[in-house]
Amino acid sequence: MRRLARWVTDHPFLVLAAVGLVTLAFAAFLPRIGFQADYSKMLPEDDPIVAQYKRTRDLFGGQSLFLLAIVAEEGGTLFDLPSLQKLYALTAELEKLKEEGLVEEVLTPANVKVVEGTEAALVVRPILPGPPATVEEVELFRRKALAERTVRDNLVLADGRGALAILRLSPAVEVREDIQAQILARLEALAAQYAGPEEFHLSGNAAFLVYVNRYMRQDLAFLLPVVVGVVVLVLLVSFRHAWGVVLPLGVVGVGLVWTMGLVGLTGHKLTMISTFLPVVLVAVGSAYGIHVVNEYFQRVARGEAKKAAVQATIQEMFVPVLGAAVTTAAGFLTLLSSFLVPTREFGLFAAFGVMACFLLAMAMIPALLLVFPVPKVRPTKLQMQSAQVFARALARRPSLVLLGVLLVLIGLGAGIPRLRVESDVTRYFREDSPVVQGLRVVDERFGGSQELSIVLDTGRRDGLKDPEVLRFMDRLQRFLEAQPDVGATSSLVDLVKESYFTLRGDDPAFYAIPETSRAVAQVLLLYEMGGGEVTKGLATRDFRVGRIAARVRSVGLSGYDALLRAVEGFVAQEKPAAVKDWYVTGSPSLYIQLSKKLIASQLASLGTSFGAVGFIVAVLLLSLGAGLLALIPLLVAVAGNFGVMGYAGAYLDMATVMIASLTVGIGVDYAVHFLNRYRNARGLGLAHEEALAETFRTSGRAIVVNALTLALGFLVMLLSRFGALNTFGWLIALTMVTSMLGALWVLPAVLAWVPEGAYQPWPRLRGLWARVGLLGADPNPSPKKEGKDEAPRA
Amino acid sequence: MKRLVLSGLCVLLGVWAFAQTADEILRRVEEQGFFGTGRESLYAALAVAIQEKGQPLVDYAFRVWAKEYPDGTVKFLLQYAAPADVAGTLFLAYVPKEGATRMWLYLPELALVKELVGERERKGEFIAGSGISYEDIAKGFSYRADYQAVLAGTEELAGHPTWRLSLSPRAAGLEWSRIVLWVHRDHYLVVRAEFYDREGQLARVLTVPELVTDAVGTRPALLRVEDLLKGSWAEVRIAERSAEAIPDAHFEPANLPKLRL
């Protein structure tokens, strides 16, 4: 270590040149970074629910929808000539998207085909042959539309207050987020063109993904400068010197280029989670620079020569900063155990970024310090006084402190059972977001914006034509429609009943399923020959597998879960033997799967991070006791976090699920710095209170600055356009503060009762560690040694 | 000078003769029809297999009767033979030389005959996903009205001597921007066809892997249509064919429930 410190201080320009070259190399890959919002890609390919989702997509076409709701002006109706003509014109524009191959299906009240019949003929055609030209045609449209079960309150409201256009993506477009963005842009332009007096609202799971993508880019462009500004402000106030700002931020800037360059180099894309990787790195990565600069400033304030101060800073800070970086990286790496692909990627790149920032803090900052002139800095009197006051209070009343902490923890712990899991992507947006407003309109007026599919496999060709199977499907549809959160449903049954009814001269007695499979088959053939398309999205070509589609309101995880359990109960009771297999799929089903895995993932990740961080601290500080002590502030912060989440009604979701692991990784830094300095002080013979005062005086400020920087940095996420990131931001900011308080308040109180031998380095390994320069390299100059002790003695 | 004029005339005559040949070949192709009878009446038994991307393979069997009338109308009767649940169903179509096609369906299980007057979204595909229309079956490769043919050359294709015809649309708005046909020089049968969409992309390919000879003459044993854009294919196997006269009564809608075929 001494050699390394000497080498760095002997070759500052070489170090800076090497950093420059590596940075340029990584920067070359920055333009290759892309974005990805498709939530089906967040789950591993081999997940059974994902496999079912993909199988359904292969069998029945795209499962992603854009929904465009048209709402009449207050007190108005769409059943008037101008509004209806507008609807037909809009439909013609939407059909162009189909002609261009951008969407697979466009369904509006203007183009939906209905079955009509006469004594001799059967017709499957749109409600009107073209746009209405007279009031009489408008009335004809209204009458025919409201007479159709598949149209009324599904595509057009019975009171004429609204209509819905449904655009279904093809499987090929479902995986092309760029094309989906194009479609959304076209829909927005059409909505703007045709709006007034009618209102237009966009929704649907495809729209959500595009908005996620759009907001990710906007967040990245907006939040990064803001977080940099916040960090600058905190550093400026803390250090009151330009270098205290420039050096930690320089480290972060370069580290960020390396990390994002690696993202581009490895061909990964930014997801909703990894979008805030830069924000996290700015907040987290600046810590290492802060500690190094803080140590150097203290040394030059004591009058040490520049080169000696830099060398001593490297030697003194290497172990604690390495410990902080490795534990933080380990915290991030525990996210690799997550089943969510974006979380794993985030963990990996964040760990790389952290280690890059550590390396730069230990190499680039010393090199720059040698290039710059020595700054004029002095410790303030207030800092020394407050260190002493704080140390005295903690040393003399540890029981009181711990009792207070225990009571707070019990109070917060009571909130943990209130914690709710949520993974509905629609809830990640802020309520004022246009896509959420569109969702509310579609949910309230058209019975739901999410699509649930119930897939039934009869195991044999033409099995769906079995009247027993169709009657079961019919009952299942009626059951679904009776559920409070389900809107319209559709299946092969609707076509069979509508066609049979028409075929029998609109006799209501024949609005039923024919008695034999042959009759069903021939009715379906007639429907198809008449211009309908039986199998599109509702049955496979061989009529072995069928699908019931149900529009579901965005009711969140508990609502979806209740609905799914109700469906499972119904199917278990009613399923005929002819239905061999069945499953439920669609976005609500994916959300549930995400949530179930989130809990398991959270527990695994949290356990791993505690274990890994404790082990790393124990190894680096050569003491099992130190490793265990370092976990105490984290227990306080993590338990507090879950309790606060429970009370605040914050969901455990894809973003907030990472807080506990990140808290362990990041929050342990304070404990490491504190413990390292405290036991050095004790090793030099200081009593507990003196050692505390010395630790507060030297490391205390850096810890507070570090925690405030992180907390304020994370609070920037309150400005994100994602509601989930807003919650993540304030919660993790809170844990930064609580883990700092844990290190500066709870840990000292515990240390009052712990014998010194429990946290001092294991003597047998101490020699080895010292030989490689990782321990006892340059004992911290104590007030006693230098003879200018400003801290009161016990 | 005289030689130059003569040479020019020869070239002009040659070009004219070449153009005439292309049109003549296309006329002979149309006469052969989809199944290669070249006669007024046609009967064939077909087996159709369809494989669409992501979908299971489905197969059907049909019997087809078609007759061309003096006014150019082709009447076309199709009986479903398989699958069992639609076996016996009859489909009757009148395809006039110009104007809209009329269609009827007889459903034996329901004992109903209905005229189908709706739009045909599948553009007349006789089975969804097959890429083959009723008109293809009834009238064969009838492109002369809409496309201008040019003889692009001769070549040997899979052992068959062929002419290569390049067809371009006579007017805008047609489904194909270009069609290339490989026509058997001895039998005037299309053995390969390529269809290019409006963007000029090869979208569909028809191939005839095998020709057989029966009492009527040489005919395709199998036609395969591949939709390159959708990744699907359909095969029509002609099991049996004849050109015997078909009674007109076969093509009367009112007779459909009574027909004993």
Image (tube, coloured by chain):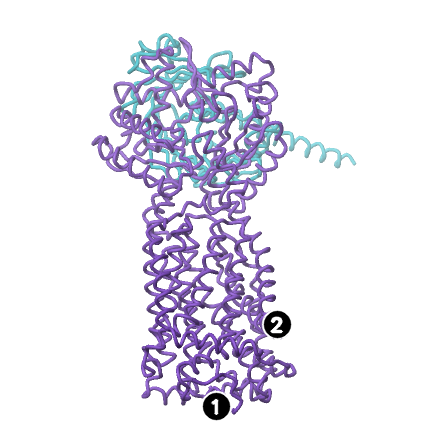
**Numbered-mark total:** 2
Check if mark 2's residue and mark 1's residue have beta carbons within 8 Å. Answer: no
- Of residues B151 and A66, the one nearer the viewer is A66
Image quarter of residue B144: top right
Distance between the alpha carbons at the discs numbered 2 and 1: 33 Å
- For this view, does A751 lie left or right of residue B163? left
Label placed on residue A246: 2
Chain represented in cyan: B
Q: Which label's residue is closer to the chain start, 2 or 1?
A: 2
Q: Is residue A144 above or below residue A281?
A: above
Looking at the rendered image, the quarter that the C terminus of chain A falls into is bottom left
Q: Is residue B70 above or below residue A31?
A: above
Image quarter of residue A383: bottom right
Amino acid type at circle 1 is Lys
- For this view, does A753 lie left or right of residue A117? left
User: Horizontal and vertical percent for residue A769?
Assistant: 39, 86
User: Horizontal and vertical percent for residue A313?
Assistant: 52, 83
Amino acid type at circle 2 is Val
- Helix or strand or loop: what does disc 1 sit on? helix
- From this viewpoint, is residue A192 visible? yes
Label placed on residue A191: none
- Of residues B12 and A201, the one nearer the viewer is A201
Q: Residue furthest right?
A: B1
- Of residues A376 and B244, the one nearer the viewer is A376
| Apparent colour of chain A | purple
Q: What residue would you read off at disc 1?
A: A784
Identify the residue at horizontal 38%, vertical 62% (top origin): A638
Chain identity of mark 1: A
- Of residues A328 and A646, the one nearer the viewer is A646
Q: Is residue A630 above or below residue A774?
A: above
Chain identity of mark 2: A
